[in-house]
Amino acid sequence: MDIEVTSIEQKIARFISTLEAMGGSAGNQRLREALGWQEATYDSIKQQLLEESRIVPGRGRGGSVALSTTAYAANQEPAISLEAREASVPYLKTKAKADSSSRDKATAAPAATTPTPRNGVVKKSDLYSSIWASCDELRGGMDASQYKDYVLFMLFIKYISDKYGDSDDFAPPVVIPPGASFKDMVALKGKADIGDRINTQVIQKLIDANTKLARSDFPDFNDPNKLGEGAAMVERLGNLIAIFEKPELNFANNRADNDDLLGDAYEYLMRHFAQDSGKSKGQFYTPSEVSSVIAQVIGISHANAKGSTTAYDPTCGSGSLLLKVAAEAGRQITLEGQEKDVTTAGLARMNLILHHFPSATILSGDTLVNPKFKDGEQLRAYDYVVANPPFSDKKWSTGLNPANDPFQRFTWGAPPAKQGDYAYLLHVIRSMKATTGKGAVILPHGVLFRGNAEAVIRKQLVRSGILKGIIGLPANLFYGTGIPACILVLDKENANARAIGATAGGSDKKSGIFMIDASKGFIKDGPKNRLREQDIHRIVDTFRRGADVPRYARRVPLDEIASDRNDYNLNLPRYIDSSEPEDLHDIDAHLNGGIPERDIDAFAADWQEMPTLRSALFSPLPPGEGLGVRARPGYAQLTVPVSEVRSIILAHPQFQRFRSKVETLFGKWQQAVTPLLTGIQPGDKPKALIAQVSETLLAAFQAAPLLDPYDIYQHLMDYWTETMQDDAYLIAADGWLALPRRIVETDKKGKTKDKGWICDLLPKQYIVARYFAAEQAELEAKQAELESVTSQIAELEEEHSGEDGAFSGFDKITAAQVKDRLTELGNDPDSADERAVLKQWQQLSAREAALKKTVKTLEAELDQQAHDHYFTLSEAEVKTLVVEDKWLARLQADVQQELERISQTLAQRIRELAERYDTPLPKLENDLAALSAKVEAHLKRMGAVWK
């Protein structure tokens, strides 16, 4: 007889116990998530309890409930036991056999429930990728460069509707007139004239109400060539709107203020559209990593920025460079930019609004021919000017006469008619304040060495002292081109010191030009290259220090640049040799044996840290030892077998001391940052957190011998991108809440399938490792036993599947076929061997089936135990699990990986050298003589004569 184990009474008891365990009150969404119920089930039970006055409704977004005073008092003590008993209810079948064991119930399939995010919060990475995937699916045959305009506008209107739609501000940054919000667009879904009404009732009203917005900023939603005609357009626009109806995209509750979450989504989409738009259409976006370098090397900071600080980008694209400058300033500053492409200018305006700079001014037009930002008849001068102009613009002079330029930009000379790089550079210099202005421009490498007219301008630029530094970047970073580029860093404030210092011999720290060759520091990212976080940090740190770094950075005196040999050619390889040292073979070692000391000396840093390790591995060549090897200075021999080198390194006391030193540094850093990590609270800024944590890590490992602190820093930043930032955003949104939620898949027909449960912040393996290690060990032992039995069955089948084998007549080896064959054989003595094999197979198969059942049961029990344990966790326990077991344990493993790399690199090089010089010429000659003698002896025995 079947019984209902999820009766109304049990559901009511579980509702009350869970609510009591959450402190007696909770938001509806949070409580429903904790219960793992469908919305209809939750609403039904809630309504019954409201009618019985056992709970009362509360306030708040999305509604909340609380235990009534009498209900709370009556249920306070039994609630604990009820909660413990009912925690597993979501795992039980709706119906179960009355005589089923508890273990059978634990393995039953869970009831299907609706998935609920934590308080409407989703992981930041999932949010971005889901928007991109949805948009890409809807794009159809439309070019990415066109479709991006529609998608980015939808993100923009969703943001301003959520943020300013119900604003009580006297003068909100963006006015949302009636009928022009995202909700009004939703109401148009399915309308035959949806495209026209979006244009006229939504977009036009926004433009009329906001002077900074223009019709050219927005795409045409009634364009049949792009969106299809009739029903096709209606469906496509309806689907596009539906993407942004997702509840996790509701930013009304100030979530858009949380670390530029939506603004970062805009940047994410722009980057992906730039990747898909091709070389001719991807120039609207400057990679954020390059923008970050520029913003940091120009010198703006929170300490020196004021409300009156001004920044300008004459070719602003989508505004990413200006935003990075503003981020470094850390306060509201004046941002102004000009962009030739009217649609891209619209992207910039929307991007700046999304990043909380609605007061920024972006104007359309050709900067060189018709600059829009002027004071009277002169170009406006700014504190900071940044630019990523189109590379080698061949049409820069159209409509412009450089010889009669009203703004005196070309007094150093007119750039070539078909190369506009220096035209933009001269515009930037002219737009910088006369004595304090600073700037940076991204230009192709050719500007450093091309001749003729550009050489004349370059000479004047160098002699002026305005050129503070040059940063060579890796090739293939930009979406518009694959050629390598460089950043020219400009500074008028100290220009005289740099220029005068050169005439005095160039020894002053401020004199000359500081050059960095960062072309080797990048990671491959799809078809493009990308600067890593460590590459950015290394560039900025080196530039700020201004100190020489071998094969990477150098301050070059102006007299060297002006010499006859260089003649103002700024090509970086002339001044910095960034190539790796060549691995040279030693001819004498090949002839006479021994390992060259110069190759061993290449690991000077290792020997300095572990001096006795060298003597444990190598010794001078003693006289008479080694066939054909003679003692001579400058060569050594390996004193241990090659196969034991790494184990000797790992076991050496000085390597152990080195390992201990690194682990101590990590421990001190861990002790310092744990309060920061456990102290994250709702409303905190994750970006500020990771900046502080990562800087302390980098500083701590500056003292680590042999390790590159930037490599350690990169491990943290990679893990931040992979996991930690999602966790931090979840905690910043609704605290240290770690509750499991159901995963439900819905197919195209609307059918749902329960795929189990998950906890984003604290995955199951951390609960199991800390609280159920014995149960996990038991499960793993059974799994290993099952694998062994399965392997034995496979070996048995393979061994006896030949022509005369026991399984030769089987189409498919199954228990039924084996049983039938045994019945057929009976007790025939001639078939004893075959019968033994089949019975062995039966025994193994039965054992396999029993083990599979046991493993399945143990898995279900462990899954159940882990799930239930979440509801017993205190906030302190959640913090320990997340910070220590999840975050810091991963980073500690990364540090151990770097230690392993040190020993592996040293051991591999020693092996390579030992094998390279293992057989010197005398030994080869002796071996040849010995072999020749053997051959001659064999020939003599055969009666042959060797001549």
Image: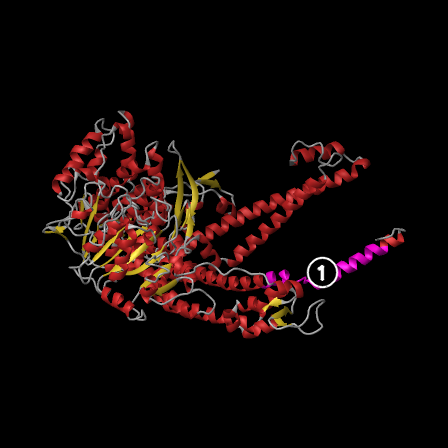
> Which quadrant of the figure has residue 903?
bottom right
Residue extending farthest to the front is 564
Is 523 left or right of 676, judged from the image as shown? right
- Position of residue 221 relative to residue 894, above or below, is above
Any magenta on residue 136? no
Q: Which of these two is toward me, 558 or 608?
A: 558
Magenta-drawn stretch, dominant element (helix, strand or loop): helix
Any magenta on residue 919? yes
Q: Which of these two is toward me, 98 or 110?
A: 110
Which residue is pictured at 18% across the width and 31% down the height? 197
Residue extending farthest to the top is 230
Image coordinates for residue 450, horizontal then vertical, percent: 33, 51
Which residue is pictured at 61% across the width and 45% down the height? 850
- Position of residue 590 relative to residue 320, above or below, is below
Is 859 left or right of 36, judged from the image as shown? right
Q: In the structure shown, which secondary structural element does the residue marked by tag 1 occupy?
A: helix
Q: Which of these two is toward me, 76 or 827?
A: 827
- Please rate how many residues cluster around mark 1, counting C-alpha atoms within 10 Å: few if below 14, some from 14 to 19, many from 20: some
> Which quadrant of the figure has residue 742?
top left
- Position of residue 383 relative to residue 864, above or below, is below
Q: Report which residue position mark 1 lands on.
A: 924
Image coordinates for residue 863, horizontal then vertical, percent: 47, 50
Image coordinates for residue 404, horizontal then vertical, percent: 16, 47
Q: Which of these two is toward me, 117 or 916?
A: 916
Report if residue 785 is visible in the image: yes
Image coordinates for residue 88, horizontal then vertical, percent: 43, 49
Residue type at mark 1: give it: Leu
Q: What's drawn in magenta, residue-wise?
A: 910-937
